Amino acid sequence: MSESEERMTAAYKKARDAFRSGKTRDVEFRRYQLRRLLMLMEENEDEIAEALAKDMRKPRMEALLTEFLIVKNDIANALNHLSEWVTPECPEVSMLNKMDTVFSVSEPLGVALIIGAWNYPIQLTIMPLTGAIAAGNCAIIKPSEISAAAAQLIEKLIPQYLDQDCFSVINGGVEETQYLLNKCIFDKFFYTGGSAVGKLVMQAAAKNLTRVTLELGGKSPCYIDKDSDLEVAAKRLCWGKFANSGQTCVAPDYVLCHPEIQESLISQLKETLFDFYGETISVKVAFKAVVGKRREKIGLEPMTQQTAAPLRRLKGLLDNGKCVIGGDTDASQNYISPTVLTGVKPTDPIMENEVFGPILPILDVESLEDAIDFINDRDKPLALYIFSNDKSKIEKIMNSTSSGGFLANDTVVHVGVTTLPFGGVGGSGMGAYHGKYSFDAFSHKKACLVKKQNMESLNSLRYPPYEEKSYNW
Ligand code: NAD
């Protein structure tokens, strides 16, 4: 066994023993760990922001909104509602069970493996961890090796704040993740990342029938209706699309709209991008790197479509349709300007996989019905967006399509609603989390029935021999 394998096995065994000791079942213990997790986020804001800037050139304000606020709200929400979540639920029962105590309890699954992705390295590890702790599990966290500064910081901070037997961080790449997936028997895999690795996680889960949550990506469409306020639509669309350089799982991937409104839409998009990123958006300022180069630099094979030499991959996509905004690249800065393409055909290569970068293709559709058909012909998306002032159109697209989440007249912000489940369907994932859904993702609902030993005569009918018994129901 290599040194790193020994370290992983030791962390796993420690967590397994700690779980068996029963200490995570104590609700006060969970509460204390959650309070410590919140302190971790509060006391290390500067260091975390610096790590995110180092990994992704993430501006502090963006980090505050997308990594701090959402995570802190989620932990605070768990602390506020934990008593409610752990209370057994008593369902309605029929006459048969009126004398019994019937309830379900949420019991912890055991030891969980949380595998994070690089694009929101804090949110995608700490939010699942919040659910794991709240539900009374032990956990091993495997941050993405691509966002290395954040991964190292998580490894440094978690043992300073949380119980060291129950919670460990393992840093590493494919080899380490494969070892954890295949050589240790976990009770839960919580994976965030691309679908190719998601399938490997499912394969590993099949061996021991481990429970799985898969938070994947995909192409999230955005339909813009003719009656929309295009100024508002452009602002909200650009914010969701170009934040984190377009490297957001729920970023609008492409726009579907009628050709009649495209000229006005493009002029609004141009204005918005000038406002957001500077007078001449082709100047290489204020825009962040597309992460991924590091993987090549450290000699790792590109493993997913999204991380395979991103700049080269994205540059290749600029040949699709006609570039009407941006299109500049600078390999020395690992830079690509916010770009909009029109006249993109459904069969163009850019429509094959998630763009996962700051390029927005616009495709023509004649009507809402065409947009619905277009969406239903493809994998179920993680998010579906519509901009329209017509309630009936919003309802129509919502009820005729399937997607992980649905948002009308904005982009991305549904992710921040703690009381909504966040997750995909079909190709965009399985299972959900955030708020109570995180607690459920790491719990087993145990059905419980407690009878008394009296009134045995009531059972006489169910015991054999049956020959002499009659019924009249
Ligand atoms: P990534 O490269 O960081 O990989 C994710 C994790 O998988 C990492 O921890 C990595 O170490 C591990 N991994 C990679 N290859 C592996 C292998 N062969 N075997 C075992 N483990 C392996 O992230 P990525 O895949 O580039 O992530 C981007 C994708 O994730 C996009 O499709 C994006 O939409 C999706 N995503 C989804 C969500 C969500 O919440 N649904 C959030 C963020 C990203």
Image (spheres, rainbow, N blue to C red):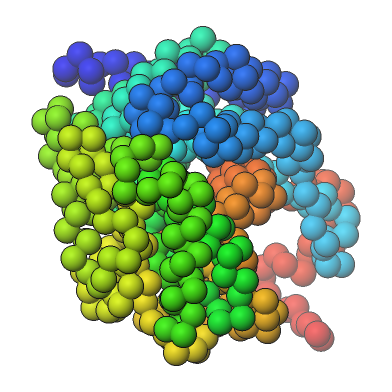
Q: Which of the pair 301/369 is nearer the observer?
A: 369
Residue at 80% x, 85% y is 473
Q: Position of residue 7 (x, y in %)?
A: 29, 15
Q: Is 121 situated left or right of 45 in this image?
A: left
Residue at 67% x, 35% y is 73
Q: Is residue 214 above or below residue 28?
A: below
Q: Position of residue 374 (x, y in %)?
A: 40, 82
Q: Is residue 288 above or below residue 222?
A: above
Image mark count: 0
Q: Residue furthest top?
A: 160
Residue at 44% x, 60% y is 270
Q: Which of the pair 89/365 is nearer the observer?
A: 365
Q: Which of the pair 284/372 is nearer the observer?
A: 284
Q: Is residue 87 above or below residue 238?
A: above
Q: Position of residue 79 (x, y in %)?
A: 73, 30
Residue at 26% x, 56% y is 327
Q: Which of the pair 425/441 is nearer the observer?
A: 425
Quarter that holds the N terminus: top left
Q: Is 384 situated left or right of 358 in this image?
A: right
